[in-house]
Image (cartoon, rainbow, N blue to C red):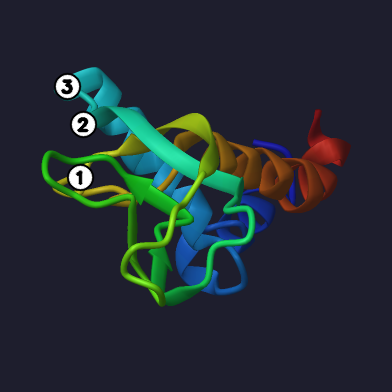
């Protein structure tokens, strides 16, 4: 091992602080992939926006980002005028999330999680190791 490489690798360990816990997530995902099924939920929704026209609500609750599970409401509302009419257009984008029972990043959306790990590697892992490559 070249001089200084061990110290550089030790400085990159997840327990040294910063945003390094993402490296632990990467390690855990790697181990799960080799040893058992990765608990991924096939469906999730991210609410980009929705239009309600001129409806007046006494109560409105929208899950902007949620792992879809049976009997989980996406939108709940009560109209201010009980006999009013609503023409609602919901705009959701599909996504993949880790299952709520996952031992690694439960309920996290996969693509943003992997993007964060990639950025961490590019910004914090590669620069101190470049001299050894």
Q: Quadrant of residue 97?
A: top left
Disc 3 target residue:
37
Residue 54 in percent (x, y) is at: 63, 61
Work out whether 36 lies above or below 118: above
Give the structural element (helix, strand or loop) at label 2: loop
Q: Is residue 109 above or below residue 106?
A: above
Residue 64 or residue 88, whichever sits in front: 88
x and y, in percent, of residue 56 in the image: 52, 71
Residue drawn where x is 12% and y is 45% of the image: 71
The residue that mark 1 highlights is: 102
Tell whether label 2 touches label 1 (CB within 8 Å).
Answer: yes
Residue 65 image offset from top left, x and y in percent: 45, 52
Nearest to N terminus: mark 1 or mark 2: 2
Mark 3 element type: loop
CA separation in Å, label 1 and label 3:
10 Å
Residue beneath disc 2: 39
Sort mark 1 into few (<14), some (14-19) or many (20+) by Cα contacts within 10 Å: some
């Amino acid at each position: 091992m070249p001089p200084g490489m061990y110290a550089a690798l030790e400085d990159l360990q997840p327990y040294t602080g910063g945003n390094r816990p993402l490296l632990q997530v990467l390690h855990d995902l790697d181990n799960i992939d080799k040893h058992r099924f990765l608990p991924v939920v096939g469906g999730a929704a991210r609410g980009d926006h929705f239009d309600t026209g001129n409806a007046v609500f006494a109560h409105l609750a929208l899950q902007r980002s949620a792992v879809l599970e049976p009997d989980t409401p996406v939108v709940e509302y009560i109209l201010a005028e009980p006999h009013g009419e609503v023409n609602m257009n919901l705009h959701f984008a599909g996504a993949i999330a880790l299952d709520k029972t996952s031992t690694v990043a439960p309920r996290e959306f996969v693509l943003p999680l992997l993007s964060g790990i990639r950025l961490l590697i590019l910004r914090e892992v590669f620069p101190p190791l470049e001299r050894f490559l």
